[in-house]
Image: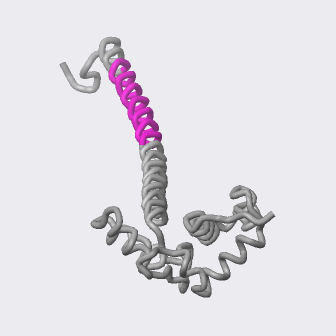
Amino acid sequence: MRRNFTKSFKIQAVEKALGRSEETTISEIASTLNMSESTLNKWIMKAKRQELAEDFPEDGTKMSQEKRPQDWTTKERLNMVITCSSYEGEALSSYCRKQGVYPHHIEQWKLDFTRENIKNTGVTFRTEIKTLKSENKALKKELTRKEKALAETAALLVLQKKVDEIWGKNEGSSQ
């Protein structure tokens, strides 16, 4: 049975396949879209050869397939997120298409940077907490040592007073 897919469905299917994570297979994506893997592979190949151009926007722009979204470096992604922050709506979509990505890629990258910063902040907090705990432990140990020394000094003073009471203060001097 032959199904007619809409242009937007084809675009979204190719985007999803090209933007997938390394753990996800084309087969899994095809099954979630309720279509055959061979059809999805055919669309991907056409998109890479720019033969799927009629399925892309009516303004004649083509999605550049020179570099897939997951092939972008972290620095390139950050620059793209910063640049796209000043665009909205159709202007954002148009700019993204010219760069070979779609707005949902930008949103995902933004989330990735946020998660990464939170994760790195968590690591910083953990190391800081660990350092503070070890400092606290060392200070408690030093405090315990000083308390013992103080208690010993107090005991010696008490004993000195008792010795002075028993034998007198100036035992060696003439009175």
146 vs 45, left or right, is left
Q: Identify which residue, 151 or 124, lies in the foreground.
A: 124
81 vs 66, left or right, is left
**Residue 158 x, y percent position in the rendering:** 35, 18
Residue 79: image quadrant is bottom left
Residue visible at 74% across and 71% down in the picture: 39
**Magenta part of the protein: which range?**
136-159
Residue visible at 77% across and 66% down in the picture: 2
Residue placed furthest toward the top? 166
Quarter of the picture containing the N terminus is bottom right
44 vs 134, left or right, is right
Q: Identify which residue, 131 or 145, lies in the foreground.
A: 131
Depicted 162 relative to depicted 57: above or below: above
**Residue 129 x, y percent position in the rendering:** 45, 45
Q: Identify which residue, 82 or 168, lies in the foreground.
A: 82
Residue visible at 55% across and 83% down in the picture: 65
Residue 61: image quadrant is bottom left
Residue placed furthest toward the left? 175
Secondary structure predominantly adopted by residues drawn in magenta: helix
**Residue 110 x, y percent position in the rendering:** 42, 61
Quarter of the picture containing the C terminus is top left
**Residue 71 x, y percent position in the rendering:** 55, 78
Residue placed furthest toward the right? 1
In magenta stretch: residue 21: no
Residue visible at 46% across and 42% down in the picture: 133
Depicted 73 relative to depicted 125: above or below: below
Colour mapping used in the image: one colour
